[in-house]
Amino acid sequence: MLKYLSLDVKNALKNNIKDVEHLQKKVTQIHNDVKNKEVDEKDWLGWYDLPKNYNKDEFIRMYNKSQEWKKAGVEVVVVIGIGGSYLGAKSGYDFIYGPYSQKQPDMELLFAGNDISADTLVSKLQYVKNKKFAINVISKSGTTLEPSIAFREFRNLLEKKEGENANKLVAATTDKAKGVLFELATKKGYEKFIIPDDIGGRFSVLTPVGLFPFMCAGIDALRVLQGAQETNEELSSDKLDENPAYLYAATRYFLHNEKGFDIEMMVSYEPKLQYFSEWWKQLFGESEGKDGKGIWPTSSIFSTDLHSLGQMIQEGNKILFETVLTLKNPNENIYFEEDQVDYDKLNYLSGNNLHNINNVAFEATAKAHTEVGNVPNIHILFDRFNEETLGALFIFFERALTMSAYLLGVNPFNQPGVEVYKKNMFSMLKK
C-alpha cells in the first residue's frame, strides 16, 4: 500500500496477480541485481537512491540562487533544454500550477530550446523582451542543436538588456568538468549546477535539472524529494503482491509479451497531466525502444479525446491497452444546485459535483472499454496535485520502467538510436 498512489490491475488481468506470478522469479533476480548494482549498467543507477542521497550543499546553492533572482525582481525564468532536460521540470510545473491556477508561481517558467521552429523562438524572445528575465540552460554536453540555438538568442537578448549584470542572471546545469556548456559557463562566470555522471537525462528530474526550475517557480523541492523517498521505501520489496511498481511493470509485460498488445496509452482525466504524460513517454519510449522491442507509448486526455479517439479505442484494431491516471482529492471543485427553471436540462446533476462527475466518466469509460471493447485497463489513483505526490509519481515510474525494460531484455539507460538523425542533420548542415 502506497501513501500517495494506488494501483488496480483487475481490468487488465483476468485472474489478477495470478496471471503474472510466473514472472516472480525473474522479477526477484532483476530487483536484487539492480539493488546490489550487479547489472552491466550499474554506472547508471545514481537515480535509484537519489531522493535520500541528493547533494545537500548543491541544494542550498540552488535555493540561494533562486531567492537571489526573486529578490532581483526576475519575472520569468527561461528554462532551456530538450528531452529529459526539460520534460520533468515542465511536467512538475504544470502539475503544481497548470495554465489557469489561482496559485501563481514565484517566477514564471518559460520553456525554450525544445524545437527548431523559427516562429516559436521569435515569439518567446518577444514575450520576454520587456520583462525582467533570467536563464537556466540545461545540457550535459552543450552541443545539442535545439537548446544551443535558443541559448545563443536568449543570451544575446539578456546581454543587450542587462549589460555586465547579465552573467548573474544565467545558471548552467551541465557536466561537472567538461563540455561546450561547461567551458562557456566557466568563461562567463555563470553559476553552475551539476548533472551527475551516473544519471541519464530521462531519469534526471530529481537532480538540479528539475529541482532548480522547481525552486524558481516556488515549488517546494524538499517536499518533492520527500514524496519520492517515502515511495521509494514503500517499493523496497521484490514481491509482486507488495510492490505496485513491479506489478505495473509485470502487467504491461504480460499484456505485451503474452497477449500481443503493442501500444500503451497513458490516459488522464486531468488536463494538467499532459506534460507528465510527455515525460512518461520519453521515459518508457527511449528506454525500451531498442533491439526491435518495446511497447509503443502514447497518451490522451479524457474526456476530451473520447470525442476524437473514443470510436477507434472502442471498436478499432485491438492493439492497445490503457494505463489510466485519476485524481483522488482535487484542489478545487464545483457543486451543482437545482435551477428553478431548468432551461439547460441539467437539474439531474443537482447535489452532485464536477469532480465526482469526472470520476463517473472514468468509470463508465473503463466499463465500456474493458467489458465491451476488450481493451485492458490499468488504473493508478494519485492523491492530489501537491509536491509529495509529484515526487511519488516520478520515482514510481522510474522504478517500474527499470523493471519493465529488464523483463523485456533491453538496457534501460542507453539510447543509441537517437544519434542516427543527428548525424544526418549535422552532415546536411556541414558541421
Image (spheres, grey):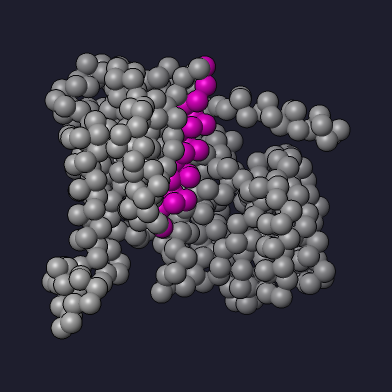
Left or right: 15, with 383 as reference point:
left
Vertical arrangement, residue 23 with respect to residue 10, above or below? above
Find out whether residue 322 is within the magenta segment. no
Which quarter of the rendered picture does the N terminus lie within?
top left
Left or right: 273, with 417 as reference point:
left
Camera-nearest residue between 294 and 384: 294
Which quarter of the rendered picture does the C terminus lie within?
top right
Judged from this view, the residue extending furthest toward the bottom is 340
Left or right: 175, with 284 as reference point:
right
Report the residue at 24% width, 65% height from top: 354
Find out whether residue 285 is within the magenta segment. yes
Question: Quadrant of residue 95 in the image?
Answer: bottom left
Report the residue at 40% width, 53% height from top: 273
Left or right: 225, with 130 as reference point:
left
Report the residue at 68% width, 74% height from top: 131
Residue 261 coordinates in the image, percent (x, y): 34, 24
Q: Is residue 35 visible?
A: no
Residue 172 coordinates in the image, percent (x, y): 67, 53
Report the residue at 36% width, 37% height from top: 312
Judged from this view, the residue extending furthest toward the right is 430
Residue 210 coordinates in the image, percent (x, y): 52, 52
Vertical arrangement, residue 271 with respect to residue 350, above or below? above
Does the magenta stretch mainly form a helix, a strand or a loop?
Answer: helix
Residue 5 coordinates in the image, percent (x, y): 26, 47
Camera-nearest residue between 328 and 357: 357
Vertical arrangement, residue 209 with respect to residue 78, above or below? above
Q: Is residue 427 visible?
A: yes
Camera-nearest residue between 418 and 188: 418
Question: Quadrant of residue 109 in the image?
Answer: bottom right
Q: Which residues are magenta?
A: 272-291
Question: Quadrant of residue 145 in the image?
Answer: top right
